[in-house]
Amino acid sequence: MAKAAASRNGGSRAERRANLRCAPYQSVRAISSRHKHDSRARFTTSFAPSICFEAIWPGAYNQLVRAGAEFLVNITDDGWFGDTAGPYEHLNAARLRAVETRRWLVRASNSGVSAFVDPTGEIVGSLRLGAVGMVRQRITTSHAVPLYVRWGNWPVPLCALVTVVCFAGALLRKRALGIDGEKDGDA
């Protein structure tokens, strides 16, 4: 399914959102919203939204960042994890999306760990597990498109192919030179 980046642009178009991947116990329903023109709007920005576990998948935001998303947003409810390492693992997986896209991640959780994550993956502001409150943080937007976002996972199979070709080339060269690996005197 596709996901459109939501934008605060005075409402010139309707935005549509659908899940990228389904995780267990996750909704599959598309969400639509219309923004009306607001003459008081002081800025225009575009962000890439995700709900709960969508943010753990590598490359989850790539399409949205290529489409112009300037920062990432993840909303979640980690209450079902209870008092375990789960909410922290969920946050750490989402932090990787900030690193791979080189975008700020704004993560809001009504029962887990809410945080601001900078483009290097550092948590610069947060509320601890189960805390009630508010965190304020100035973030910057970015229009840069990192290599991983541009090309995705293709370098991995390319490296595997290069390795196989190099190994096959070395094996063929070894046979062409008559090197068979046996020592003199072995029979």
Image: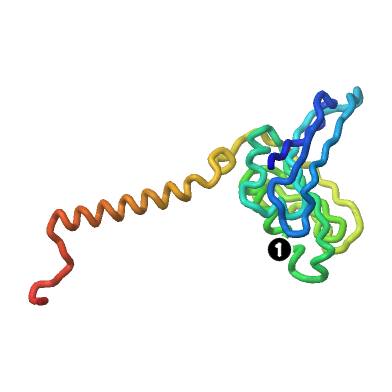
Q: Position of residue 45 (x, y in %)?
A: 77, 32
Position above or below: 164 against 17: below
Where's the N terminus, which quadrant?
Answer: top right
Position above or below: 148 against 111: above
Image point (47%, 46%), residue name: 155
Image point (35%, 53%), residue name: 164
Residue 11, image quadrant:
top right
Q: Position of residue 117 (x, y in %)?
A: 73, 50
Side of 37 where 1 appears, left or right: left
Where's the C terminus, which quadrant?
Answer: bottom left
Side of 167 where 72 appears, left or right: right
> Is any part of residue 16 visible from this angle?
yes
Q: Position of residue 180 (x, y in %)?
A: 16, 64
Residue 46, image quadrant:
top right
| Circle 1: residue type | Glu
Residue situated in front as seen by the camera: 41 or 62: 62
Image point (26%, 51%), residue name: 169
Q: Position of residue 15 (x, y in %)?
A: 79, 33
> Is any part of residue 125 visible from this angle?
no
The residue indicated by pointer 1 is: 89
Residue situated in front as seen by the camera: 81 or 20: 20
Side of 135 where 71 appears, left or right: left
Position above or below: 80 against 69: below
